[in-house]
Image (cartoon, rainbow, N blue to C red):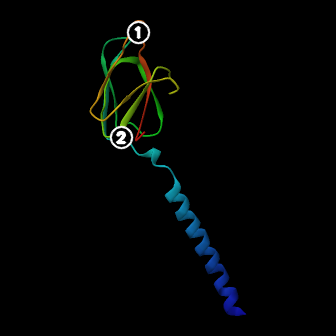
Amino acid sequence: MTSKRRTAPIRCLGTVVGATLLLIALVPSSAQAADGQFPYIRFDTGTLDALVNPPNGLCLQLPGGAAHAGNDTDATAFVYADTGCQQLLAIVGVGGTWDETGPPPLPARSVGFGSG
């Protein structure tokens, strides 16, 4: 019986370690960043701004809105008309660009990055 008592904690530890590794493997890769820049012309001032190495899987606001943007990252950019990434304006592939169209002017207010 003593050998069974000693192996029970080891089996329990093995189960805990296995479950932990499984959870780590299942965590989404949204914390990874898109390598590169997402330069944009601010709608409010006409000046150049940029997001550098933006994280994947998050909704990022574009301060001042964007009238033009280029996707110089290694991930697809999803451009939105609202600040909450709900009203999709365009999907901009790697190396692509986006321009505000109108009338009326409809600047981009947020962007998300990922594989789509």
Q: Amino acid at mark 1?
A: Pro
Residue density around tag 2, few if under 14, some if 14–19, many if 20 or more, within 10 Å: many
Residue plotted at (49% across, 59% down): 25
Q: Position of residue 112 (x, y in %)?
A: 44, 33
- From the image, tell me which residue sits under label 1: 105
Residue plotted at (50% across, 23% down): 87
Decide if residue 5 is on the left or right side of residue 100: right
Up/down of 103 relative to 59, above or below: above
Q: Position of residue 75 (x, y in %)?
A: 35, 39
Find the residue positioned furthest to the top.
103
Q: Which quarter of the rendering shows the N terminus?
A: bottom right
Give the mark toward the camera: 2 or 1.
1
Q: Position of residue 53 (x, y in %)?
A: 34, 38
Residue 43, by quadrant, is top left
- From the image, tell me which residue sits under label 2: 34
Residue 20, by quadrant, is bottom right
Decide if residue 32 is on the left or right side of residue 94: right
Which of disc 1 and disc 2 is earlier in sequence?
2
Query: Circle 2 sits in a helix, a strand or a loop, which is it?
Result: loop
Residue plotted at (30% across, 35% down): 94
Q: How much space separates mark 2 and mark 1, taking CA atoms?
A: 28 Å
Query: Circle 1 sits in a helix, a strand or a loop, which is it?
Result: loop
Find the residue positioned furthest to the right.
1
Q: Position of residue 102 (x, y in %)?
A: 39, 9
Residue plotted at (70% across, 92% down): 2
Up/down of 104 relative to 60, above or below: above
Decide if residue 10 is on the left or right side of residue 78: right
